[in-house]
Image: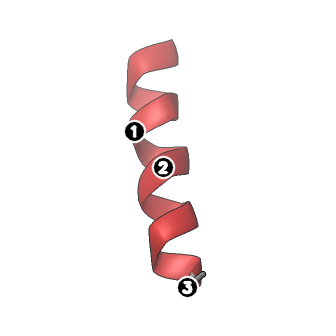
Amino acid sequence: MTPSFFDNLTLAEYCLSR
């Protein structure tokens, strides 16, 4: 898997967690 994919997931989770 590419780091971009993980970054996207992290960003999405972060926004949702907010």
Which x, y percent locates residue 1? 60, 81
- The residue type indicated by label 2 comes to Leu
Q: Quadrant of residue 12?
A: top left
Q: Is residue 10 in view?
A: yes
Horizontal placement of 12 versus 6: left or right?
left
Q: Look at the picture and state if 9 lies above or below 13.
A: below
> Do the CB atoms of the residues marked 1 and 2 lie less than 8 Å apart?
yes
* Res. 18 in view: no
Q: x and y percent of residue 13 in the render? A: 50, 31
Q: Which residue position holds label 1?
A: 12
Amino acid type of disc 1? Ala
What is the x, y in percent for residue 17?
51, 15
Please name the residue shown 51% across and 31% down the image: 14
Colour treatment of the image? secondary structure
Q: Residues within 10 Å of mark 1 (few under 14, many from 20)?
A: few
| Residue position for label 3 | 2
Q: Earlier in the sequence, mark 3 or mark 1?
A: 3
Q: CA distance from mark 1 to mark 2?
A: 5 Å
- From what the image shows, is residue 2 above or below residue 15? below
Q: Is residue 12 left or right of residue 13?
A: left
Residue occupied by mark 2 = 9
Q: Is residue 6 left or right of residue 16?
A: right
Decide: is 15 above or below 8.
Answer: above
Residue kind at label 3, given as amino acid type: Thr
Label 3: few (<14), some (14–19) or many (≥20) C-alpha neighbours in 10 Å = few
Considering the numbered disc 1 on the image, is that residue within a helix, a strand or a loop?
Answer: helix
Quote the CA–CA distance across marks 3 and 1. 16 Å
